[in-house]
Image (cartoon, rainbow, N blue to C red):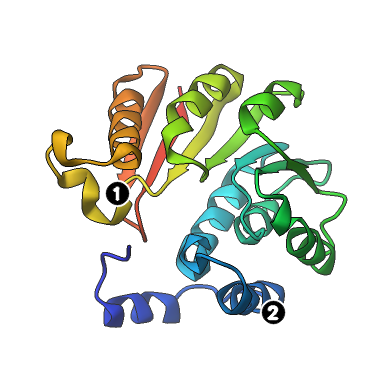
Amino acid sequence: MNFLPAEIEMYAEKFTQPESKILQELNRETNAHVLQPRMLSGHLQGRLLSLISKMIQPSLILEIGTYTGYSAICMAEGLRKEGVLHTIEVNEELKDIILSYITKARLQEKIKLHIGNAKEIIPRINGSFDLIFIDADKENYSAYFDLTVDRTKQGGFIIADNVLWSGNVLKPFHQMDAETKALSEYTEKVYADDRVESLLLPVRDGLLISRKK
């Protein structure tokens, strides 16, 4: 998943703003007690999401795929005073740890957790989004983009995680599995969409950052 040599990543983390104590604790607990801890955004990606949020100072953030809440807490750091982050998670078993750390971070008034199918929940959330983070089931990335791009404010960002998929997107298309094909198709689809301008950033497992024109 990580494309940088371990020594370079450690050097980058050394000169990157450290995680808060709450995020450090959540990182440890996720790695110790939750399945597939590699899904956690982690230090470098978390600080990048926080920095982007602080730069644009969003009023409304949508996250599709909460996991244990690490990335939601990072992005909430940049919310305006009246801002809200809506985060959607399909796995109800993660609800307790998510809410626990949202409360520990004192963000229960800022982060609204939705449990269920994102394609059903997104239309029920009112407003136009300043920042969207897609990190859920890969086969539906394109559907999530279609559901949100026209609701993204001019100058807002749609960020999709895992678009390099451990390098599997470089395989011939006929050798890709369903998730890899979906990610490859998403990247090509968004790159060709003239409503956005995009940058594929090879941080961790690849972030496709798209700005609404």
Secondary structure under tag 1 reads: loop
169 up-or-down from 102: above or below: above
Name the spot of residue 110 as percent of width and height, x first: 81, 49
Measure the C-alpha gap from mark 2 to mark 1. 30 Å
Closer to the camera, 130 or 124?
Answer: 124
Q: Earlier in the sequence, mark 2 or mark 1?
A: 2
Q: In this view, which residue lies farthest toward the right? A: 109
Q: Residue at point 51% right, 35% down?
A: 157
User: Mark 2–mark 1 contact, CB under 8 Å?
Assistant: no
Closer to the camera, 147 or 15?
Answer: 147
**Looking at the rendered structure, which numbered label has been put on residue 21?**
2
Horizontal side of residue 184 vs 40, given as left or right: left
**Looking at the rendered structure, which numbered label has been put on residue 135?**
none
Name the spot of residue 92 as percent of width and height, x first: 72, 50
Horizontal side of residue 156 vs 210, given as left or right: right
Q: Residue at point 43% right, 27% down?
A: 142
Residue flagged by tag 1: what amino acid is it? Leu
Q: Residue at point 26% right, 69% down?
A: 4
